[in-house]
Image: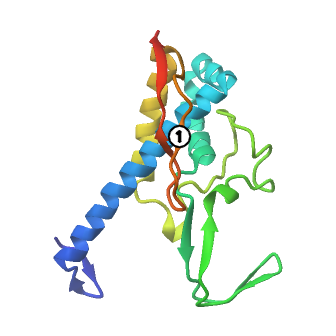
Amino acid sequence: MTARVAGKPLPATDLLSYYQLLVAAGNETTRNAASGGLMALIDHPEELAKLRANPGLVNAAVEEIVRWTTPVIQFCRTPIFDYELRGQKIRAGESMCLFYASANRDEEAFEHPDEFHVDRSPNPHLGFGIGEHFCLGASLARLELRVIFAELAQRFARFEYAAPPARMRSSFIGGVKRMRVRYRLA
């Protein structure tokens, strides 16, 4: 426990709270990207066929899955200085909310933003945040998702819904609450 803030050791309760945040954030977001990615591949069988035909697309597919599913719906922020964005004044100290799914469907940033493409390039999504708020676990999440989807694409001959999926009801984390799937191994 050598973490320090302003030269002082981080209190044990703060450190434990930080560990809890890492466990929860890393679990929920990756789990929801994985289930949402499977849902996207079931809903877009032509994209699954592309991934099966070209396993080298798995990195691009993972980025598209994170963009498409956007597990973190929103974060609230408080700007520290005045800023103007597209004619809208944002004042220091005001509360604001960033909706990541909206950014990940921005027609100025993405060609055909409402379509799912495992070979999308470039893919400047904000599913892991940006700048000083970039996800600490992004590299681990990408690795986990690459392994999951590389294996799913190659080891399963087919998968389909066994019942309609149910989505979580949350204003913060988006994902699948329940998704029953029928599958056949390759």
- Residue 178 position within the rendered picture, expressed as x and y whole percent measured from the top left: 46, 38
**Residue at x 80%, y 53% (from the top left corner):** 107
Q: Secondary structure at mark 1?
A: strand
Above or below residue 113? Residue 160 is: above
**Residue at x 23%, y 71% (from the top left corner):** 15
Q: Which residue is mark 1?
A: 166
Q: Could you tell me if residue 120 is visible in this image?
A: yes
Residue 119: name its quadrant. top right
Q: At label 1, which amino acid type do we have?
A: Ala
- Left or right of residue 46, residue 36 in this image: left
**Residue at x 31%, y 55% (from the top left corner):** 23
- Residue 147 position within the rendered picture, expressed as x and y whole percent measured from the top left: 42, 31
Residue 46: name its quadrant. top right
- Left or right of residue 17, residue 115 in this image: right
**Residue at x 42%, y 40% (from the top left corner):** 143
Q: Nearer the viewer, residue 5 or 152?
A: 152
Residue 56: name its quadrant. top right
Q: Could you tell me if residue 130 is visible in this image?
A: no
Above or below residue 6? Residue 61 is: above
- Residue 57 position within the rendered picture, expressed as x and y whole percent measured from the top left: 59, 29
**Quarter placement of the N terminus:** bottom left
Above or below residue 24? Residue 39 is: above
